[in-house]
Image (cartoon, rainbow, N blue to C red):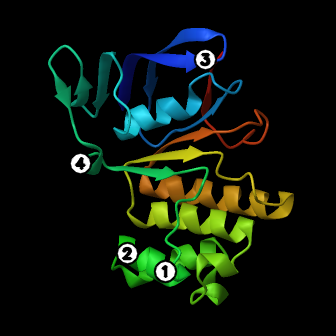
Amino acid sequence: MINIMIEKRLKAYHGQQVLRVNRQFATGSITKIYGPSGSGKTTFLKIIAGLITPEKGIIRVDAVSWFNAGAKINVPAQKRNTGFVFQQYALFPNMTVRQHLEYATTNEAWIKKLLLLGKLDTLQEHKPDYLSGGQQQRLAILRTLATKPQILLMDEPFSALDAKMKTELITELKVLLKEQGTTTLIVSHNPHELDGWADGELVFE
């Protein structure tokens, strides 16, 4: 269970606004997050990951405090078992598809399973420059899954995929995430993109 009650000031086009979230996320649940640009969706994911620090509040994961402003607790990002799929992919240009996964795990069976999941098994020796945008996006997802994170944070993870690939990947991902018991939060510009897949939603205004 993730308990989050935080406040963070945001810089907005029309002045300053405050991001406030008070929410619980059940272990293994999948939550879609949507709302207008600038409403704090990406900032919220980065707060959970420990990349941004809120001014007030708490983040507690399975009764362990990751952040508590009052008690001055702030667990470093590298010690939080989170995986983050960034909008910009953040791939290593000098690494092949396989090397990206090997960098994250030594489990060969898991690597093979992920390559098949992302339909990148025939492109293992390709570097990012030789992959399409959709293939790069799938690699970014696979690399994040390779560490078997406790919490998976995904920022517009399917934006470069065609409808058929998106449907296939989402269907297989749901099974995998449930098997792993991964708590997943997905920011999407399309509130209907994850209909029938997510367990709940969080709407930012």
Asked if residue 186 is positioned above or below residue 86 in the image, the reply reads above
Q: Earlier in the sequence, mark 3 or mark 1?
A: 3
Task: Give the residue pinned by disc 1.
Answer: 95
Task: Give the residue pinned by disc 4.
Answer: 79
Q: Secondary structure at mark 1?
A: loop
Q: Earlier in the sequence, mark 1 or mark 4?
A: 4
How far apart are the alpha carbons under marks 3 and 1? 37 Å
The image's mark for residue 12 is 3
Q: Secondary structure at mark 2?
A: helix
- Relative to 13, 77 lies left or right: left
Number of residue marks: 4
Residue type at tag 1: Met
Q: Residue furthest left?
A: 71
Task: Give the residue pinned by disc 2.
Answer: 103
Q: Earlier in the sequence, mark 3 or mark 4?
A: 3
Q: Report the residue at 69% width, 39% height from top.
A: 188
Q: Earlier in the sequence, mark 1 or mark 2?
A: 1
Residue type at tag 4: Lys
Find residue 193 and report its horizontal and vertical position in percent: 77, 42
Q: Report the residue at 58% width, 82% height from top.
A: 127
Q: Secondary structure at mark 4?
A: helix
Q: Secondary structure at mark 3?
A: strand
Q: Are marks 3 and 1 in contact (CB under 8 Å)?
A: no
In this rendering, does residue 103 appear at all?
A: yes
Q: Nearer the viewer, mark 3 or mark 1?
A: 3
Q: Quadrant of the N terminus?
A: top left
The image's mark for residue 61 is none
Front-lying residue, 93 or 7: 93
Q: Earlier in the sequence, mark 4 or mark 2?
A: 4
How far apart are the alpha carbons under marks 1 and 4? 25 Å
